[in-house]
Image (cartoon, rainbow, N blue to C red):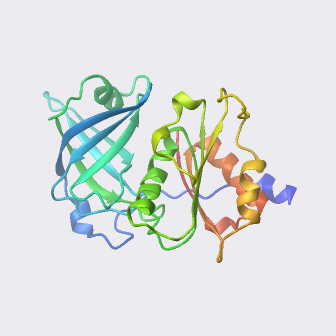
Amino acid sequence: MTETLASFTPPTRFAVPGRIAVSNRAAALWQTATLTEIRRETPHAATFRFAVPAWAGHLPGQHLMLRLTADDGYVAQRHYSIASAPDDAGHIELTLDHVAGGEVSGWFHTVAAVGDQVEVRGPLSGFFAWPGDRPALLIGAGSGVVPLMSMVRHHRAQGLSVPLRLLVSARGPEELIYAGEFGAETTPVFTRSAPEGVPVGRMAAAHVAPLLAEQPPGGWEAYVCGSNAFAEHASRLLVAAGQPVERIRIERFG
């Protein structure tokens, strides 16, 4: 097993539009999205809620392309995971970190105001989508929790009985995005500071192995999202605990 883990490279797939039952034509069209609400999540992350009346719908885990156009005609485009559940018809939410030097995230965090408009296109990528039809083991770090939170919200909105668990890593409680929304399905892991009595440290086998030891019927479909380093670390923990490689879906950034 040591040799297998040493040579294991987690598979990563990139966004491919139209891989699920969403209209390819609708996903290819740019639509106007109007900013209706800004919610602070952490000192460095905020959620931006948009009204998109003609949004064709999405599955939890999908993302979109966002386009900003400056007054001088300069255009910037970025891919962002969708944080909201598909049950929130006519609206989508994005949760963005304020990236140092980031022109798009910088605009959102320092300039954007309710009433502003941007363009969006999607949904994109079916590989990381979770339709809610199989047990889901979700593992994320930092803003990697965003597409996973769409899954958690959908699970709650639909009252799904299929098992779902979330392991989420953050530097400390103040950096835990969506902290006020997590319930019994979520186990936070803090790497630098934690509430009294809660251990501090990197996500480890002790967090993952118990979930693989008591799997639901049919096993888990694992979804991992985070930085390159975190995605590789978490997927190796899963494989070491017995999760089949072909049932690990990964989205990574950075």
Q: Is residue 94 left or right of residue 214?
A: left
Residue 75 x/y as whole percent: 23, 36
**Considering only vertical position in the picture, is 53 above or below 247?**
above
In the image, residue 8 sits, relative to residue 143, either above or below, namely below
Between 224 and 49, the one lying in front of the other is: 49
Residue at x-position 53% and y-position 50%: 183
Q: Quadrant of the N terminus?
A: bottom right
Q: What residue appears at the point 44 percent right and 24 percent down from the top-left corner?
A: 43
Which is more toward the observer, 168 or 229? 168
How many labels were placed on the picture? 0
Q: Which quadrant would residue 45 be assigned to in this image?
A: top left
Q: Residue at x 46, y 40 (%)?
A: 180
Q: Please provide percent x and percent y for residue 32.
A: 15, 48
Q: Is residue 109 left or right of residue 36?
A: right
Above/below status of 201 relative to 225: above
x%, y% of residue 82? Answer: 37, 50
Pick the front one: 41 or 112: 41
Which residue appears farthest toward the bottom when viewing the image?
Answer: 218
Compared to residue 116, the image places residue 247 above or below, namely below
Which quadrant of the view contains residue 114?
Answer: top left
Residue 30 x, y percent position in the rendering? 19, 53
Q: Nearer the viewer, residue 45 or 152?
A: 152
